[in-house]
Amino acid sequence: MEFENSFEVPLPPAEAWPVLMDIERIAPCMPGAELTEVVDKETYKGKVQVRLGPVALSFAGTAKFEEIDAAGHTAKVRARGNDAKGRGAANALVAFRLEPSPAGSRVVVRTDLTLTGAVAQYGRGVGMIRDLAGQLMGQFATCLKAQLAARPAQPAPVAAEPGTAAPAPPPPLPPAAKPISGVSLMLRVLWNALVRLVTGRTS
């Protein structure tokens, strides 16, 4: 299944790009995500947890950049993960790009997701997966914006004078976001279904 999400950040593309490519720093902003190993500058290992009602899914896998165009501010990531309890796997090709916007930059994320095994049954509704992706991106964007807003201006480095305090350390990494709740997801899915139904009847 394919779906697209987007959000905005208060930085122009040239400044937003290195922030988004700093995987170690932004990974904690993704709900339920944990970065476990940096294999190299293009390959990362981690875990992702998602709860759908009583069903808790935990995927462990690898994400690898297949394409990076720093000048064009576009990239493609291939992610593969297996459920910890052997209930299936998830494979995704994620392409994202930055576009100038009045707020700074618009981040457009296009995902081609394939689920196999029992997890494919849990996520058999395309609308549910899209709603979940929308919630994930929404929480990620909120966390990222808060991190950028708290980031102090970066003046040119100046050698400290004798007897003066050392430069302030960089802001701490944001706390890991919590996994999406199955209850909130189901309420969102039902609301979206109702809106689509009403819209269809009145159009």
Image: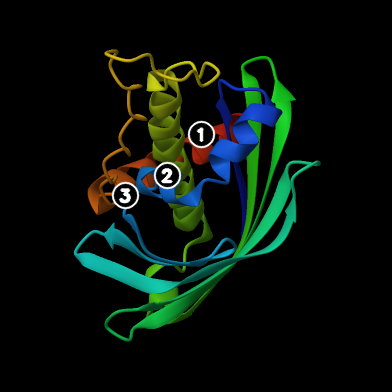
Could you tell me the amino acid type at mark 2?
Arg
Number of the label disc, if any, that sits on residue 186:
3
Q: Quadrant of the C terminus?
A: top right
Which of marks 1 and 2 precedes in the sequence?
2
Q: Comparing marks 2 and 1, which lies closer to the viewer?
A: 2
Given this view, does label 2 or label 3 mark the residue nearer the observer? 2
The residue that disc 1 covers is: 198
Q: Which residue in the rendered view is the most extreme toward the front?
A: 162
Q: Quadrant of residue 13?
A: top right
Locate the N terminus by quadrant: bottom right
What residue does disc 2 label? 25
Give left or right: position of 136 versus 179.
right
**Mark 2–mark 1 distance (CA, rounded to whole Å):** 42 Å
Please name the residue shown 30% across and 35% down the image: 172
Q: Residues within 10 Å of mark 1 (few under 14, many from 20)?
A: few
Label 2 Cα crowd, 10 Å radius (few <14 / some 14-19 / many 20+): some
* Image-quadrant location for residue 135: top left
**Rendering coords of residue 92 (x, y %):** 57, 67
Do residues under tags 2 and 1 come within 8 Å of each other at their CB atoms? no
* Marks 3/1: CA–CA distance: 18 Å
- Residue nearest the observer in this picture, 161 or 147: 161
